[in-house]
């Protein structure tokens, strides 16, 4: 009986000792585990929210792009219908005056007078083969005529605007030249004006919308290459067989050769 009592008491002591050793964990370790678990949960929730937000934005970008494609198509069809109607009536269809021009600097700094230099700076054409979009009004048309010997300009179509922005487009953020690699760059700078993606930016530029000034200032001047096949003669006007001055819709072929 004594041996049995001694054995039972010894077993209880070992069980109690093992139980105590297994359950004891320092408080600092428990706090650390809890903190790590909370951080992990917060990261997961943040990732899920970001994923959902990106999905919604992609859908929004796609819907806007569809709207713009329909708008461009309707505009082109209305022009074709107007031309056909005018032809059937035996008259002529005169398109509205262009509101947008793309200006390309084709000559360097040698022999440039101060007034011309100032106008080129206002157009942000500081280097040869730089290009910018310009809203056409009475003031800008007069300025373009004054710098005609140094620039080639004309009226871009949708394809030219798209190719320039997609291929040569850089953003001006905090006075720095940043590549447009994500729509978030556009949204951060122009989101307050309702421009949140590249298609919004193209639409605002091409249609010369109410926020054209902000959208154009957001774009860094395009740095183009020498045109494939070279220039004909930069020192004389386009209507005389050269390259300088206004070339209206023929600017599209020049820009596409330089892009």
Image: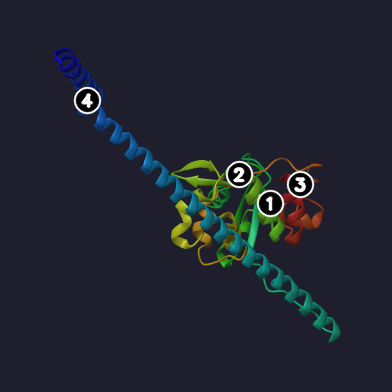
N-terminal of the pair, mark 2 or mark 3, is 2
| Proximity of marks 1 and 4: CB atoms separated by less than 8 Å | no
Which label's residue is closer to the chain start, 1 or 3?
1
Q: CA distance from mark 1 to mark 4?
A: 68 Å
**Residue 84's quadrant in the figure?**
bottom right
Q: In which quarter of the view is residue 129 placed?
A: top right
Quadrant in which the N terminus is drawn: top left
Depth order, front residue of 38/72:
38
Q: Which mark is residue 163?
A: 1
State the residue in front, 106 or 156. Answer: 156
Going from N to C along the chain, the mark reached first, 2 or 4, is: 4
Secondary structure found at label 3: helix
Look at mark 2 in the image and give the residue it sits on: 112
Q: Sequence order check: which comes first, mark 1 or mark 4?
A: 4
- Front disc: 1 or 4: 4
- Residue 186 vertical placement versus 108 (above, below): below
Q: What residue is shown with label 3? A: 257
């Amino acid at each position: 009986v004594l041996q049995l009592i001694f054995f039972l008491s010894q077993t209880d002591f070992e069980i109690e000792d093992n139980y105590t050793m297994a359950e004891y964990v320092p408080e600092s370790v428990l706090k650390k585990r809890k903190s790590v678990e909370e951080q992990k949960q917060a990261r997961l929730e943040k990732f899920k929210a970001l994923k959902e937000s990106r999905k919604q934005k992609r859908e929004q970008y796609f819907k806007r792009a569809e709207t713009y494609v329909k708008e461009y198509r309707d505009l082109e069809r209305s022009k074709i219908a107007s031309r056909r109607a005018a032809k059937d009536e035996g008259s002529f269809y005169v398109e509205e005056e262009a509101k947008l021009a793309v200006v390309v600097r084709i000559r360097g700094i040698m022999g440039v007078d101060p007034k011309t230099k100032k106008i080129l700076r206002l157009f942000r054409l500081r280097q040869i083969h730089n290009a910018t979009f310009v809203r056409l009004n009475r003031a800008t048309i007069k300025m373009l005529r004054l710098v005609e010997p140094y620039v080639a300009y004309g009226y871009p179509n949708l394809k030219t605007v798209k190719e320039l922005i997609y291929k040569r487009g850089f953003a001006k953020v905090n006075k720095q030249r940043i590549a447009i690699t994500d729509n978030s760059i556009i949204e951060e700078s122009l989101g307050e004006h309702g421009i949140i993606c590249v298609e919004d930016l193209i639409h605002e530029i091409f249609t010369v919308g109410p926020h054209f000034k902000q959208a154009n200032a957001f774009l860094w001047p395009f740095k183009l290459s020498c045109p494939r096949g070279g220039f004909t003669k930069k020192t004389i006007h386009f209507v005389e067989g050269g390259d300088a001055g206004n070339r209206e819709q023929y600017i599209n072929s020049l820009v596409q050769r330089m892009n």
